[in-house]
Image (cartoon, rainbow, N blue to C red):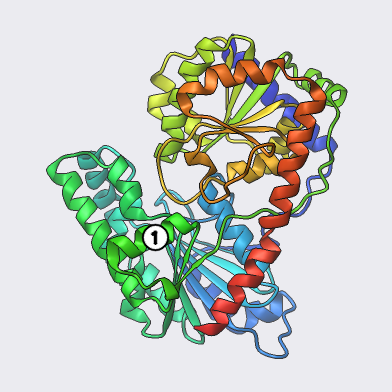
Amino acid sequence: MKGAFADEVRGQLERAVRRGDRGARGPALTIKGRPFIALTLAKKALRSMVGRKQEPRLPRLVVVNTFNCWPPHGGGQIRILNFYKTLSERADITLVSLAPSSCAYRTLVFNENFREFVIPATRKQYSWEAKLQEALGVYATDIAAIDNLSLTPDFATVLRLALHDADIAVAEHPYCFRTLRQVWKGRVIYHAHNVEYVLKSAILPKTEAGDRALAAVASVEKECCAAADRIFAVSKSDVDALNELYGAPKERMFVVPNGMTVSDARDLSHVEREQNKRALGLSGRVAVYVGSMHPPNVEGALALLDIARKCPNWLIVFVGSMCDSPRVRQAAQPQNTLMLGCLSEQELDRLLCAADLGLNPIVSGSGSNLKMLTYMKSRLPTLTTPMGNRGYEFGRGQCFVANIEDFPSELDAIARMDATSLSSIASNGYEAAVARFQWKDIVQHALLEFEGT
């Protein structure tokens, strides 16, 4: 019955989006097939194909990464797309991305100054990843890429061609850094979404295979920090950790926080939220938790399942690929929980307009959680752990902050609050986020550091 209800809610969201304006947020052009023809076009014909005219010449950046970014389902994908889309107003961006072997070669053109070459892993690469993943028991595409991207020779070939007239290369995470260094000796920026050693320490098993993998992560992260002209970290705590772990000079590190694009979301009244709930077949107090299959998100989901049993007056809705995690699927799911899986951006917007609260139960990890800004952008009151508030430090009256073990009592207290008080907290959070975390402001600051390299 719960599965049928989830299907009905998803159906209502899809129909609501079809009735509304989808917007043009995806690629403007997709070229399918192996990238070599596209690359031949890319340096000459592709630019004219999309009507590009650059006077004066824009700085040219080539960004290398271990996962493709469209469609975005996780915080890393969302950060990359929004950061570089905004930056493409002032620079020319080529993203070279490794994709699962099941994906097709394609070139995505987001605008005249921003494109992505998607290179699927070969069967040899996939086989190596699968063996490593079996030994570790966790996702291992990124770790497998540290020293084995040669198993997908097209990746280095495409990267070398893309870098032909580049000014700066950007290592998005450290995992492709050694491959980048094989084909590029120029200026490098390390875009550190997390402190990878800290993140992987909490995820990898305490086994011989896990220790070897963690040592490999530390080694390549140290190399990347040492070679980079600039290091962009998501929070001050990450700057401090990279300095402490690897001696990375703080004068070369800059905080580039997660951000958001300000929408036209207005402060919905209690009556309007109740109407939106009924349109989706929901009722009562509704809290939403958004997360990818990133291990800290899965850990948070498992904690929320236990919390839901203690808070039967709340319906807790789980959104994102974490719903497909075997650990989440195998866990007992209380009747007052709903697993919706991945939604489009527009569908998620509709759901958040029908919710009473955003949840961020993160208790481990590194970097910062974009879901905080997703909730606040929708003017939704937010309950987070102190760990989930890292990188933002939203204050009292802007969101609710509680340790994970205190979530049940905090949820009971929030349920007793009047609509006016909740609306005030939502508005305060929205205004604080707008003042400090707009992509246009973040990118403007980062651009000065790009130009300084």
Callout 1 amino acid: Asp
In the rendered image, the residue lying farthest to the bottom is 56
Left or right: where 295 falls relative to 203:
right
Residue drawn 58% across and 52% down?
78
The residue carrying mark 1 is 240
In the rendered image, the residue lying farthest to the left is 208
Asked if residue 166 can be seen in this view, the reply is no
- Position in image of residue 50 (x %, y %): 71, 74
Relative to 442, residue 69 above or below:
above
Left or right: where 255 falls relative to 445:
left
Asked if residue 400 can be seen in this view, the reply is yes
Residue drawn 57% across and 12% down?
311
- Position in image of residue 195 (x %, y %): 38, 55
Left or right: where 317 falls relative to 234:
right
Q: Quadrant of residue 378?
A: top right
- Position in image of residue 106 (x %, y %): 54, 61
Q: Nearer the viewer, residue 288 or 23?
A: 288
The kind of secondary structure element at disc 1 is helix
Q: Quadrant of the N terminus?
A: top right
Residue drawn 46% across and 30% down?
300
Residue drawn 80% across and 23% down?
419
Relative to 222, residue 436 above or below:
above
